[in-house]
Amino acid sequence: MSKTDKTMLDDAALEAFFEAGRAHAPEPGPDLMARILADAGAEIDARDATLAAARRRRRPGLWAGLVAAIGG
């Protein structure tokens, strides 16, 4: 028996299943939300540290400063 021979649900029946799933969507618990926010804070701190290090590396040298001051 091929896949096309099987009985398939019509769109209305599928929509009923999807509606039931949307109606009973679980809410995340406070522990999960606290862990998510802690992870987000750690990622922000790590990104800020990486950006600060990149800014320090990009500081122009003496010659670049002189050329910029002269306008060249």
Image (cartoon, rainbow, N blue to C red):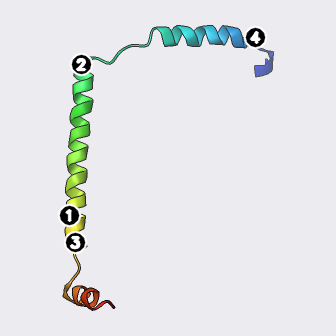
Which residue: 79% across, 17% down?
1
Where on the picture, by quarter, is residue 52? bottom left
The label on residue 57 is 3
The amino acid type found where label 3 is placed reads Arg
**What residue is disc 2 on?**
30
Residue type (three-letter) at the residue carrying disc 4? Thr
At numbered mark 3, what does the secondary structure look like: helix, strand or loop? helix
C-alpha gap between disc 1 and disc 4: 61 Å
- Measured in 3D between alpha carbons, the distance from the residue under mark 1 to the one under mark 2, in whole angstroms, is 35 Å
Sequence-wise first label, 3 or 2: 2
Judged left or right of residue 53, residue 20 is right
- Asked if residue 70 is positioned above or below residue 13 in the image, the reply reads below
> In the rendered image, which quarter contains the C terminus?
bottom left
- Out of 52 and 11, give the one closest to the viewer: 52
Marks 1 and 4: CB-CB under 8 Å?
no
Q: For mark 2, give the secondary structure.
A: helix
